[in-house]
Image (cartoon, helix red, strand yellow):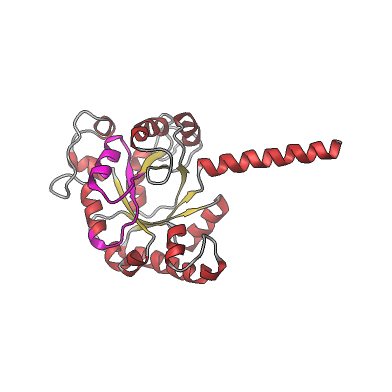
Amino acid sequence: MSAAAGRPDPAEFAARLRAREPLVGYWIALDNPVGTERIAALGYDYVGVDGQHGVLHQPGWQAAMLAVDARGRSAGVIRVPSPDPVAIGAALDTGALGVVVPMVESAEQARTSVRACRHHPAGTRSLGGPVRGELRLGSVPAEIDARVACIVMIETAAALADLEAICAVEGLDAVYVGPADLSAALGARYFGDPAAAGELEEALARITDAARRHGVACGIHVMDGASAAKRLAEGFTFATVSSDITHLQQAAAAHLDAARALGAAAA
């Protein structure tokens, strides 16, 4: 625990994830370190930075991790673009305490991702030397590995078909549902399509059950805090709330609507 008001130390993120503690995170899609620092001050257990679909690409990952760490309240996590060991190593060298690996479709890809997060003899990660990862976590490989979480996404039909084997991969810390892509894989025409709602809920129940039986954490991306609470109650162990770019647009639209409504009433 952190000395500050008894809050959990962000460096304990991987251990808390592995223990299947309920965790709530937030998603960053914008290349805006000042905004990211504001979000990281709020008390989310982790802040995920989107290096796959966001406008924040690899040159901005380190600035984002610096912004998250500045307040000492949240763990910084990076979603890399693909199950590429080079990208995973680059993300961890920034000082990230975990990676989210998208589009994992087999146990073999999950195993490759895990090994990219671990040093010899458990994996293939290269010692970074005098980079930010060493500054944060030291230079003892086993100690670094203990502080870093490997999270793979379940978001395709192939991943669902190989779910049991993926969850059984040694050293895997968590699986994470991408509900939009998973919905499409189940036949939805768009995210939220009611025609695929039943199939999606069945798949989510399968995923949470498999993760529980194999002792790995299980997360999901949601659109609001109420949905995060619902999913945690259903068996997910962590949930990531919406994103900075979504909330920026929602807040601006709400203020515009309020201003126009008040203006019309005064006319």
- Would you place residue 140 above or below residue 82 in this image? above
- Tell which of 112 and 20 is nearer to you: 112
- Tell which of 126 and 16 is nearer to you: 126
- As for residue 99 lying within the magenta part, the answer is yes
Residue at x 46% of width, y 71% of height: 202
User: Relative to 16, is 197 on the left or the right?
Assistant: right
User: Relative to 20, is 248 on the left or the right?
Assistant: right
Position in image of residue 19 (x %, y %): 35, 53
- Tell which of 39 and 17 is nearer to you: 39
Position in image of residue 255 (x %, y %): 68, 38
Residue at x 48% of width, y 39% of height: 43
Position in image of residue 116 (x %, y %): 22, 48
- Tell which of 171 and 179 is nearer to you: 179
- Would you place residue 34 above or below residue 88 in this image? above
User: Relative to 197, is 101 on the left or the right?
Assistant: left
Q: Residue furthest right?
A: 267
Report the magenta residues as a range: 79-108
> Splitting the image into 4 quarters, where does residue 192 fall?
bottom right
Residue at x 57% of width, y 53% of height: 226
Position in image of residue 256 (x %, y %): 69, 38
